[in-house]
């Protein structure tokens, strides 16, 4: 009659961070960008050419992901190289690949 259910609680800060990352990556173009960055650092031009997206769009997406701490940038002369710095991104991409949709 009074069966107890085990409730797992996740740290609220961790939940908030995960929600921010999931919301930000909930966009097909951003997912394509982080998938491109899985191979290593890339410039806006390299990403833009790989994905055949306008440079301004790629820059906007990278700025949002940088603001959320998903990617980081390294300047090398006139070039800015982006890389993934949030470990959860790899898990999210693997989950998407393994899902039976």
Image (cartoon, rainbow, N blue to C red):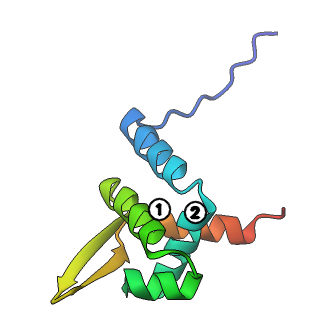
The single residue placed furthest to the top in the displayed view is 1
On the image, the x and y values in percent for residue 99 come to 76, 64
Q: Residue at left 36%, top 77%?
A: 83
Q: Is residue 30 left or right of residue 55?
A: right
Residue 48 image position (x, y, % from top left)? 49, 81
State the residue at coordinates (56%, 34%): 8
Q: Secondary structure at mark 2?
A: helix
Q: Where is residue 56, by image quadrant?
A: bottom left
Neighbour tally class for label 2: few under 14, some 14-19, many 20 plus, Cα within 10 Å? some
Quadrant in which the N terminus appears: top right
- Asked whether residue 38 appears in the rendered view, the answer is no
CA separation, marks 2 and 1? Answer: 6 Å
Q: Residue at x 58, y 81 (%)?
A: 51
Look at the numbered discs 2 and 1 and tell me whether their residues touch, using CB distance below 8 Å: yes
Please tell me whether residue 56 is drawn above or below residue 49 in the rendered image.
Answer: above
Task: Please indicate, yes or no, whether residue 31 appears anywhere in the rendered image.
Answer: yes
Instruction: Tell me which corner region of the image, top left, top right, bottom left or bottom right, holds residue 79.
Output: bottom left
Disc 1 on helix, strand or loop? helix
Q: Is residue 54 left or right of residue 82?
A: right
Q: Which residue is mark 2?
A: 92
User: What numbered label is drawn on residue 79?
Assistant: none
Q: Relative to 81, say whether 90 is above or below.
A: above
Q: What quarter of the picture does the C terminus occupy?
A: bottom right
- 2 lies above or below 43: above
Give coordinates of residue 68: x percent, y percent: 35, 53
The quadrant holding residue 85 is bottom left
Residue position for label 1: 88
Farthest left residue in view: 77
């Amino acid at each position: 009659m009074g069966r107890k259910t085990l409730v797992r609680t996740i740290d609220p800060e961790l939940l908030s961070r995960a929600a921010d990352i999931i919301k930000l990556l909930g966009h097909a173009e951003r997912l394509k960008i982080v998938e491109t960055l899985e191979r290593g650092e890339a410039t806006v031009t390299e990403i833009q050419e790989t994905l055949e997206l306008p440079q301004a769009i790629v820059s906007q997406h990278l700025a949002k992901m940088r603001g959320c701490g998903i990617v980081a940038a390294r300047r090398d002369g006139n070039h800015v190289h982006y890389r993934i710095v949030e470990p959860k991104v790899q898990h999210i991409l693997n989950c998407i690949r393994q899902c039976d949709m």
